[in-house]
Amino acid sequence: MKLPVLVLSLLLLSLGLPLQRAEPADVVFKNGNVYTANNKTPKAQAIAVKADKIIFVGTNAAAQKFVGPNTRVVDLKGNTVLPGFTDAHQHLSGVGEREMTLNLEGTTSLDDLLAKVKARVDQAKPGEWVTGRGWIETHWQPPVFPTRWDLDKVSPNNPVILGRADGHGAVANSAALKLANVDKNTPNPFGGEISKDKQSGEPNGMLLDAAQGLVRRRVPPETKEDEERAVVLGAKRDVELGWTQIQDAGGDYGDVDIFKKLYAAGTIKLRIYKAVYGPGPQANRLLNEGTIVGEFGNRLTVRTIKVVSDGALGSRGAALLGPYSDAPDTSGFLTVKAEDLRPMLIDALKKGIQVETHAIGDRANRFILDEYETALKAVPVSERKVAEPRWRVEHAQIVNPADIPRFAKLGIIPSMQPSHAIGDLFFAPSRLGIPRLAGAYAWESFIKSGVMVPGGSDAPVERGEPMIEFYAAVARKDQKGFSAEGWHPEEAVTREQALKMFTIWPAYAAFEDKLRGTIEAGKLADLTILSADIMTIPELEILKTRCVMTVINGGIVHEAT
Ligand SMILES: [Zn+2]
């Protein structure tokens, strides 16, 4: 008598006998130093994958039964395997554009900046715009913003606008200001500031937050081809660094159309969890049309509205509860009006739309917690499309200690970027004063309060490299190992926590914790494979660690040569 396979299997299982053969896998990864981020079985050697899913995690010996005649066996040679890393806050187009325009990352001084601009101006046609991004004056001597007059020296005729790395400020030269009709009589737009020379009252070229738009509007728009190329370049860089998903913190449906086109053509493999800006037409479209979830093999989801509630600390645009310690005449500014926000939050809860809000200063954080709380009270669970809406605060950078427990209480997720701390802590003590640094970049306090803290890079504001973020989270020192008074080393996290910050916690923040984020059978096969064991090596060696392989949906999308 021939028993059907299933019955036979059940019979063997019931007898406690091991199955000799399993359904063959498409790929078996073996000889790995696997960290699963799954508390039940934290370590393993081998992973079997069928189609896009993990079907087995365990020892090399046990994985052997998944090897059939057509199974690809990948020898990981002892390399370290982690659940596919997710960047919980990135600006994908911006990362690509940084590769395409004047990339000013790592500019060491004003002279260095001017030399880079001059080289570009020399190649430009008369009147052609020169745009760039990525400078930051923190380590310059002296650490002051460049001015229009500095830029005029190297570009008297071509209009120039150069974004500060944080995106919340830009410097424009006189030619650009003239084209935009910005002069000493131009009023500050809402949510922005035209920085003025103290003596003459003339604009000095620095434009903060919304004021950048006055000049940026004059820059010829990117072509569709440029926009697509930026996404392709950004996605390529991301998978090479080991990111398997990025959570794209803002943008519009034009981006969504580009992603769809590139996915359909198979040009990009990176997963994108996309937010669109609101309040406004983009948010309204999401509220009206509803979400896009898990299209293109669980690669594309659009279910989130991104709100921006203040500026950044470096440019003193972050909204603080008290004045800046180094500029007592200002306490920053909010960039969204409560009356615009409130109806949108209510609607979002009813329609099951996630909201994430940029909040840097302690006033912005308190403001958005208050607004979220009001909306959550106004719409009881029974009237919500998604009972647990997993709303997020992006950055949650300077939070009054009294507000930290409110996140857990309200179910709000603080989505934070470790590299911001190790860059900002050079100037944060002077902006805020030492006492206000309690509650700044407070990762460990947040985790202890009972929330998950998804980790991100905010690239192109920061470099956007997973190893820099992981290092910053566990070391809380700059890339040379330096820290100073007010850096609060006790807010560094353990390596196990850091692993979760870039894997299962961002998955939770995207409603994907059942789908991905750990290495376990049944989940999507996303893996980040590294040249060294970042769970044990000395801190500074984390920065030298390289991504040797990236796997998305079971497919190898990057392999270092
Ligand atoms: Zn951002």
Image: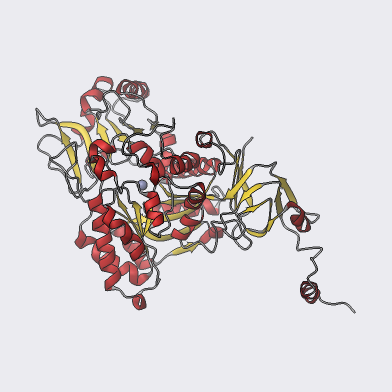
In the image, is residue 426 above or below residue 388? Answer: above
Q: Residue at x 27, y 36 (%)?
A: 170
Q: Can the viewer see residue 223 in this picture?
A: no
Residue 330 in percent (x, y) is at 15, 42
Considering the image in quadrants, where does the N terminus appear?
A: bottom right
Q: Nearer the viewer, residue 366 or 355?
A: 366
From the viewer's perspective, is 432 left or right of 261? left
In the image, is residue 549 above or below residue 298? Answer: above
Residue 53 in percent (x, y) is at 63, 59
Query: In which quadrant of the rendered view does residue 478 lie?
Result: top left
Considering the image in quadrants, where does the C terminus appear?
A: top right
Q: Residue at x 25, y 28 (%)?
A: 146
Q: Residue at x 27, y 28 (%)?
A: 143
Residue 120 in percent (x, y) is at 36, 24
From the viewer's perspective, is 257 left or right of 533? left
Residue 10 in percent (x, y) is at 77, 75
